[in-house]
Structures are given as structure tokens and as C-alpha cells.
Amino acid sequence: MTAQNQIIEALNAARHIVVLTGAGVSAESGIPTFRDPLTGLWQRFDPMELASAQAFRRNPALVWGWYEWRRMKVMQAQPNPAHRALARLAKHTPQMILVTQNVDDLHERAGSRDVIHLHGSLLQPRCFACAREPQSRLPVPNEPEQGRELEPPRCEHCGGRLRPGVVWFGESLPEAALSRAFSAAQEADLLLVVGTSGVVYPAAELPTIARSVGARVIHINPQLSLEDGDWGIAGAAGEILPQLIA
Ligand code: BV8
Ligand code: ZN
């Protein structure tokens, strides 16, 4: 645990801040984190198993139903004080780059600009066969609370199935997003890691890159697991961040 005023001083002094967020920053908006046990129709599945191309090939309606249920949750959710505090921080920092592993748009809806999405987005499906995006936005899903299987819509161009616009396990991350995030970490003098279990690669490389250039790495998470030299505050992002960035 590091004293809050030490961290506030470091945030004030930093010229190049990189922020890496994970599902924990959207938890207080009511969006289950990736490691929360799944509920309803999907409770017998491990998200790791569902978030893959082979799961989609094996049972497209089950996987598409899960993502449409999640898209509905995101569209019903509101940004929380953590998202808003990060949008404020960017306004008071000479240079701040926000990198997220999340596939929701809550950072954008809180006012953050130019967010780097390492794992894609729930809100922009594309064709599994020809990768084109549908012309028209898909209607807001109105899923039952426990969710249901849902046949994915077909592509207007080639008739292939639409898939969620997220990066699945075993798929490469968007090249531009990853290289922008890595070079931002190489330029950072402070990396703020908020609400991620830090187990998924290559996103989890960012703290290592930041440390290698002498940046201070600061974690905000109810469950802290600090590498030596890192600083951290145990707690919920929606409570801690507004205090740090008052
Ligand atoms: C790649 C989008 C290779 C989808 C996600 C075997 C087979 C295939 C690949 C691998 C393999 N073994 C290892 C790999 C690599 C794999 C990987 O890293 N696996 C891990 C599990 C070991 N990585 C990949 O497959 C990546 N691709 O490597 O490609 C390749 C290379 C070259 C060429 C071709 C291919 C792709 C990874 C991206 C996967 N997609 N998401 C979807 O959302 O459905 S990852 C998914 O999990 C999330 O997006 C998120 O990014 C990630 C981790 O979740 P977190 O965000 O950290 O959330 P989590 O629930 O884990 O933790 C929440 C945290 O918040 C906790 O710490 C909790 O304490 C905290 N918290 C809770 N409440 C709060 C809070 N904090 C603050 N405030 C609160 N209130
Ligand atoms: Zn197509």
C-alpha cells in the first residue's frame, strides 16, 4: 500500500502518463468483470472458453447470444466516477494516453478521447467470413436477464455470419493499437494500472515495458499484487481515482 499523497505528487509531476484499464474500471457501472463467475445461460462456461473463434464456430448462437447480452448491459450502463476521473486527469496532464482492454465504450462516454482499445469493441460487429462491417448499426438488443442463444445476423455482402468486433483468445491484437500502446509505455514516466488482473498477454506486457524505461508503475485494485518497486492503492477505482484526481 502506498500513501495517497505520494501518488498524488507523482501524478502531478508526471509529464507522460499512460493509463491501462481492465474490466475492474467498469465493474462499478454494473458490468461483470471477466473473472466474475458467469450467470444465467452461460454460468456453466468459462469466459476464456467462450471468447474464442472455435467456440463461435462450434456454437455461433451461444457465443453471439453472450455478446449481445453483454452489449445490452453496456448500452444500459453509465460511466462511473472512475471513468470520469480518468477523463479529467487527461485534461490536467501534458500528455496522457488511455489504453483499455475493455470492449465497452464507457471511457468514451465519460469524455475520454482517442482511447486505444487493445481487445476491440462490443459495439462494432463484423463479418466472420469477409470482415466487412454492416452498413447499419445493429438494433439495441433486448435480452432476457438470463440471456439466450441467438443466431448471428448475416453479412449483406457475402451472407457470412456476423461476429463480435472483439479480439478473441488466440487472435492477434489490432496492429496499430498494440504498437501505439507499446510506444506510449516506452515514453511514459508513469503508468497507472486500474482494474486488471494483468494475466492476459500481450496487454500485460505494458507494466514490464514501463518499468524497463524507469517509469513509476501504480496499481489501483481491491486485490493488489505488486511487483517490487511498484506502488499501489487497494480499493475500488470509482472511490480511489476521484480522490487522487480531485
Ligand atoms: C494472442 C476480448 C496469439 C474478448 C479479451 C493458449 C491459446 C491461445 C492463446 C494463448 C494461450 N496461452 C496464452 C495465450 C495468449 C493469450 C493469453 O494471454 N492468455 C492468458 C489467459 C494466459 N492471449 C491471447 O490469446 C491474445 N492473442 O496472444 O495472439 C497470436 C500471436 C501471433 C499471431 C496470432 C495469434 C488475445 C488476448 C485478448 C483476449 N480477449 N477480451 C471479450 O471481452 O470477450 S481478454 C479479456 O480478459 C478482457 O478483455 C480483459 O482484457 C482480459 C483480462 O480481464 P481483466 O480486464 O483484467 O478483467 P479481470 O476480470 O481479469 O480482472 C478484473 C480486475 O479488476 C481484477 O483484478 C479485480 O480485482 C479488479 N476489480 C474488480 N472490481 C474493481 C476492480 N478494480 C478496481 N475497481 C473495482 N471496482
Ligand atoms: Zn461478409
Image: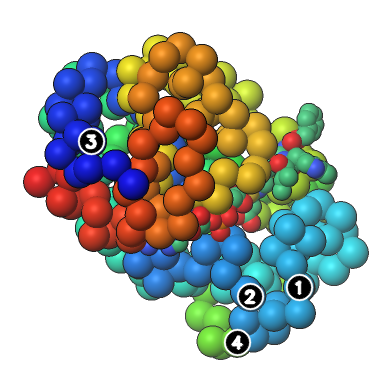
* Badge 4 element: loop
Judge depth for marks 1 and 4 and give the one in front.
Answer: 1
Task: Specify the label residue 7 is tagged with.
Answer: 3
Q: Are marks 2 and 3 in contact (CB under 8 Å)?
A: no
Q: Looking at the image, tell me whether mark 1 or mark 3 is earlier in sequence order.
A: 3
Q: Are marks 2 and 1 in contact (CB under 8 Å)?
A: yes
- The residue lying furthest to the right in this view is 58
Local crowd at mark 2 within 10 Å, few (<14), some, or many (≥20)? some
Q: Earlier in the sequence, mark 2 or mark 4?
A: 2
Task: Compute the Cα span from label 4 to label 3.
Answer: 41 Å
Q: CA distance from mark 2 to mark 3?
A: 35 Å
In the rendered image, the vertical position of residue 71 relative to residue 94, given as above or below: below
Q: Residues within 10 Å of mark 3 (few under 14, many from 20)?
A: some
Callout 3: helix, strand or loop?
A: helix
Comes first in the chain, label 2 or label 1:
2
Q: Whole-Å distance between the Cαs marked 1 and 4?
A: 14 Å
Q: Is mark 4 within 8 Å of ligand 1?
A: no
Give how far apart the Cα atoms at labels 2 and 4 are. Answer: 10 Å
Observer-nearest residue: 218 or 245? 218
Q: Whole-Å distance between the Cαs marked 2 and 1? A: 7 Å
Q: Amino acid at mark 3?
A: Ile
Nearer to us: label 1 or label 3: 3
**Type of amino acid at the residue the image marks with label 2:** Leu
Give me the disc on residue 146: 4
Q: Which of the marked residues, 1 or 4, is nearer the chain's N terminus?
A: 1
